[in-house]
Amino acid sequence: MKKYFYSLFLFLIVLQFSTLSYGQTTQKERLEKHVYYMAADSLKGRKAGSEAAHKVAEYISNQFSTIGLETILYKFDFPIISLSSDGPYQNVIGVWEGSDSILKRELIVIGAHYDHLGTKLKKEEEIVYNGADDNASGTAALIELARNLVQQKELTKRTLVFVAFDAEEIGLQGSKFFINYVKAVKPVHKMVLMINFDMVGYLKQSGKLKIAGVGTVQNYLTYFNAVSFPESYRLVLKKKDHSILTGSDHDSFLAEQIPAFYVTTGLKSPYHKPEDDAHLIDYDGLSIIVDYFTELVPIFANDTHLKPSDGLKKTSFHDKKSYFGLTAGIGNMRYNYRYGTVDGKKGTALQLGLYGKVSLSNSFALKGEAAYSYTNRYRKEGIIQTHEVTFPVVLLLKSTFENWIEMSMGAGGYYSHFFHLREKNFDPIVKQYYPYEVGWILDFEMRVSRMIYGLQYRYGLNEMIVAPQEEDMARSRIVQFKIGFVF
């Protein structure tokens, strides 16, 4: 009997010591533990829908449950994309219900995506993209922020929903499915604000924390002025998110007219590179960010006057039917000789300009450009280098998918004015050129969020040289790959 009591006593001592040890674990240490787990080589880069991603989802789910959140592991699939992944995809949802009988139906969503790029083969070697900053850092911050808010003595009036999104890297699919899930399962609830953590692990290196999209909330300075940020770092508040190269899950909420903030320390980390590893993360800075939002979130969650701003619709790019932007093109041009056996040699064709796209209906749009172009035109007589201003106009047939991806193709015409020509190794007899070129265009374009990718084929309809001999008659052909972004 004494042996039994002795064993029980020993067990209780060990249990108490373990509990005390965990309780003494600092927030910084827990953040480091989360990031090192998610960004380990063994998890193969957490590719969306993969077995490794499922392990991370289970890890986050266990963290949420331990904290005390009502935890939901929501699975979803989309076959067209999931052919390249294991599937299904999983969002991890943790709910902390609000205390106010009315305001608890209003949801403040705090999210971060946990998936990354997976692995790639390079010279038969598997390269792992661990994604420590993108976005193990944001997911770790999400977990510890949830812990802090749950451990506070007073409940918030509004319900807090913590979401770790899957499939962000393949088109923000996790956040889109989450929004549809809330609409279907909780139709009486309304999402009033979304806060998105994406790449928040480089505060020291960046020197600043950027919160974009604050202008989607009325009187946003009232909230942010109530909480101080360490003076050794800059807090940069942007009314709108003007990110060009990156998109994140907050965009899905903006597309639904839900106010959303994008929290990031920027692109100081090795973005989408295999060097994005856990040992490079600034864990002191990550802890500072968690502490800041531990104070800030309850202010939003308890304010009875929280409302979207009048500028929210303007902030939501995805609802735009017409837009303007910059575009650049690179390709080649050659002359098509109409008679004889001579074929033109390929030369360089570069372009930079402004463009606008106006929607005529759900299926048709009109696109116009004003661009500077440079070409090396190889003719059999010699080389002409041109500097020109080009004005293409194209009628497009378009198709849009969830306001996120837009495909279009069409045809039109163009006019180019040559404002400077330079001859190289040219036949001295040929001296007169037309100062312009007109022709027709075939245009193919894809928009993914704010980025534009396209292919354009131009065919000239007039001769460049005045009164050419029959064997010298030639029409220009230009093929260009184009890339651009939308303001």
Image (cartoon, grey):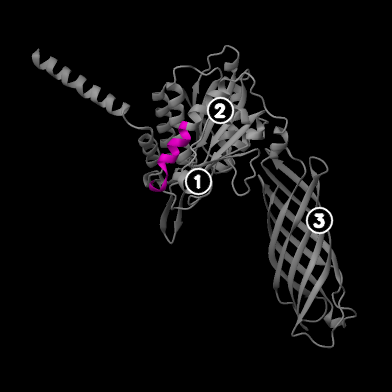
Q: Are marks 2 and 3 in contact (CB under 8 Å)?
A: no
- Foreground of the two, 148 or 354: 148
Is 54 on the left-hand or right-hand side of 22?
Answer: right
Q: Which mark is residue 207?
A: 1
- Foreground of the two, 60 or 385: 385
Residue matched to label 3: 411
Q: Position of residue 369 (x, y in %)?
A: 79, 56
Q: Confirm whether residue 69 shows in the render.
A: no
- Quadrant placement of the N terminus: top left
Disc 2 element = loop
Type of the residue with mark 3:
Ala
Circle 3 crowding by C-alpha within 10 Å: few under 14, some 14–19, many from 20 = some
Disc 1 element = loop
| The image quarter in which residue 342 lies | bottom right
Type of the residue with mark 2:
Ala
In this view, 410 is above or below 171: below
Label 1 – label 2 distance at C-alpha: 21 Å
Q: Is residue 72 magenta?
A: no
Look at the image and give the residue range highlighted in magenta.
Answer: 279-291
Q: Nearer the viewer, mark 1 or mark 3?
A: 1
Q: Earlier in the sequence, mark 1 or mark 2?
A: 1
Residue lying at the far right of the rendered structure: 467
